[in-house]
Amino acid sequence: MDPDRIDAPEQAEREAGDRPAPSRSPAAPRAAAAPGRQPPTTKRQVELRGLSAYYGDHLAVKNIGLYFSAADVTAIIGPSGCGKSTMVRCVNRMHEETPGARAEGEVLLDGVDLYGPDVDVVAVRRAVGMVFQKPNPFPTMSIFDNVASGLRFTGAERGETDDRVRKALVEAGLWEEVKDRLGKPGLGLSGGQQQRLCIARALAVDPEVLLMDEPCSALDPVATLRIEELIGELKERVTIVIVTHNMQQAARVADTTAFMLSGELVEVAPTDKVFTNPDDERTEQYVTGKFG
Amino acid sequence: METRVQYQEELEQLEASALGGLDLVSAALGRTLEAVEHQDVELAQIVVADDDRIDGRYLEVHQALITLLATQSPVATDLRLISALLHVLKNVERMGDQCVNICKLIPLSGNEPPSDEEMVRLILAMGAQTKTLISQAKRAFADRDVELARDLVRQDDVVDDLNRDCFRLALEIGDDADRREWAMTMLLAARAIERIGDNAVDIGEQVSFVVTGLFQEFEDASHPSA
Amino acid sequence: MEVGALQPRGPLPPVSGRRRRADRFARSLLWLATGVAIVPLVLVIYYILSKGLGALSVEFFTTDPTGDFFGAQGGVKSAILGTIEIVGAAALVAVPLGVGVALYLTEYGGDGRLARAVRFFVDVMTGVPSIVFGLFIYLTLVLAGVGGSSFAGWKGSAALALLMLPVVTRSAEVVLQLVPGSLREAALALGAPRWKVIVRVILPSAASGIVTGSLLAIARAAGETAPLLFTATIVKATTFNLNEPMNSLPAQIFQDLKQPNDELVQRAWGGAITLVAMILIVTLIAKLIQRRSRVQGAP
């Protein structure tokens, strides 16, 4: 029992833990204010403006407006079939590779519309890299050749290739494990290593943005965590957009989270807000597992 | 098919258990007041022993909530609810301890009948008001009623006023050497009741946190209304 | 397998006698069918070996047929070389063309109307009898005297190429379709232009399958007689000029078999052995390549 303070006996004693901390709002967002909704002004930022995507007559992505901030990780979550993969594939113009598929609207990278009339699709894909769900190293190539493949496709000079391959493998956290067997086939690696190889391959061409479509779903938990660690390290260098089914992963890895439902963007906010106090009821229902 | 039904049901059960702790506290407070009124040492001892039940409830529900955190990865409202329930449990346990503190004072005041009816009246009034506070806090949490929770501050102000009256009365009695000691113990009891009231207000603040996601101190002496 | 009744173990009932009898009956049927299929093959091999082994000698492989009825008949050198030349030239044309058509069908045509029409016609061509190809070339190239000659080795190659083309196309298309779409996507996503994706990623992945398919097409074409009769015809001398009439093993065998001379007939059988052996070697090489690529390939 603590003695009352003589000067103000009516004032409640503040015992540790008895009186909660004074008012505070939820933790300050890790990215710029209202991320996803307001344009930051640094390089390597992507803006989607009125983006819609079709498969034939079917509208899969409906008029999306969204920002991916530079040096940030944005996660796109949502139930199966909500259009998140489709939307992301529009950013590097892979969506149009599917027969009958087309996209409308604008995708701006540093202010330049990637769907503009004079834009070279190949150049878009060099600036916006992609890592896929199932690791897909080229089976006929060695580890070195795999990482160098992007460079060779884009016609890089011979002399730089060695350095850039090494740099990419270091960035992907794979160098130590493969430096003595660069000539061995890429398929000889474990699943997690193969995926890091694919990440190195994508990084070697020096993209500004890296799109990751459920990169860990085919991997075991340890490999998954290693790649999440990697994402945290890479985000200083590339803007990262990650599509994921795994909400805990989004919560661990992303600065900003966007929730999509039936082709529409429902909510985008700092990750901790989405997972502690989302604005939209549908977001609340999805993250707490009431549906999806 | 609905998802996470078992998890939802478990969470509801744990909330009911935690709030049920408030019922236990209310009952303990009632018996405590009776013991004070009649200087009933035996009843006081029963209250002290019964506090084990409240502590048991605390441990049980606390453990279950921790397990739920570990296994179900709750987020958003569920997460806020679990955090709030952990706070509420702590409040319940403290309230129980305050009742025990009061009961431990009763033998100290001697086995003679109380020396000042006015003091006893004040204390009983405080107790009754505090019981109202407790049941209002419980209702506010169960119904997620933020307005009702805010009203707890007003109710608690009554308790605080009565506590001040006790203090003044004790000062007056203090001149009388025979009754001085008794008055001191009564003052300590009053203070314990006042603390119970504050715990109830804390529960109200948790209601606001669950509903709005923001943590705010309700108006009290350190945050007077404008 | 067990014989006699099984003691029942817990919830598992034993195999019934009726099932075992049915099993034995079915097995015997299968053995019988296999036997029926293999026996003629064995007989053929035995027959040609017994008939033709005697003809094989160093001379057989190193001298040209003299065309004389009496006296030294010579060997079949020109026929062997001719087969190699004609089939080789046909492959040089058919394989790139066939792979090209297959690439069009898998990479560009997709499910469009043109692609479907092409596939249909390729399927039809695989069924056309080889003599029809021979006749076609005969009418269009030989009679018209294209290239300044009537019969010529290259015209034989043309006929064989027509024969090989649908086979190469179909097998290449199958192999190309087996290349996982994810590889195409990975290469495209790296910023590779379409043609580089094909040349650097898809073709290397499909390479062994395409080679195997081509070798099998070659093996088939090497044995065709009818087209060559109308196009390259039969000559005695070895020649390396494809613009002249050229000898070939099937043609040589065909001619020798008609002669009333026993030794010539035996030479025909010797030619048959040689032809079978050559085709066998090509097939074995194809199998070896297939095996090696499977071992090296994806786990």
Image: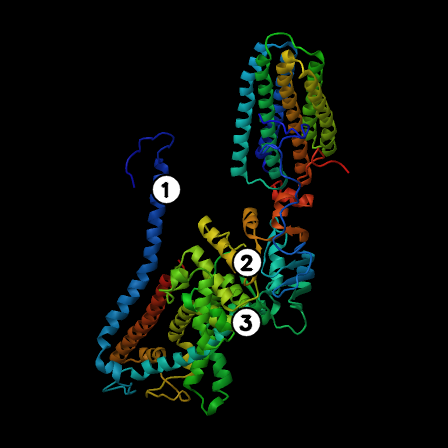
Percent across and percent down for residue A15 are 59, 32
Q: Position of residue A24 (x, y in %)?
A: 65, 43
The numbered disc on residue C22 is 1
Q: State the separation of the CA atoms marked 1 and 2.
A: 56 Å
At label 2, counting other C-alpha atoms closer than 10 Å, the crowd grade (few under 14, some 14-19, many 20 or more) is: many
Residue matched to label 2 = A212
Is the N terminus of chain C in the top left, top right, bottom left or bottom right quadrant? top left
Residue A218 in the image: above or below residue A168: above
Q: Chain of mark 3?
A: C
Quadrant that contains the C terminus of chain C: bottom left
Residue C198 visible from this viewpoint: no
- Picture quadrant where residue A144 is located: bottom left
Chain where mark 2 sits = A
Distance of mark 3 from mark 1, alpha carbons? 57 Å
Image check: A259 left or right of C187?
Answer: right
Foreground pick, C77 / B207: B207
| A67 left or right, relative to C56 | right
Q: Is residue C47 left or right of residue C211?
A: left
Select label 3 or label 1 by which is in front: 3
Question: x, y percentage for residue C90?
Answer: 43, 79
Q: Nearer the viewer, residue C223 or C39?
A: C223
Q: Residue visible at 37% across and 39% down?
A: C19
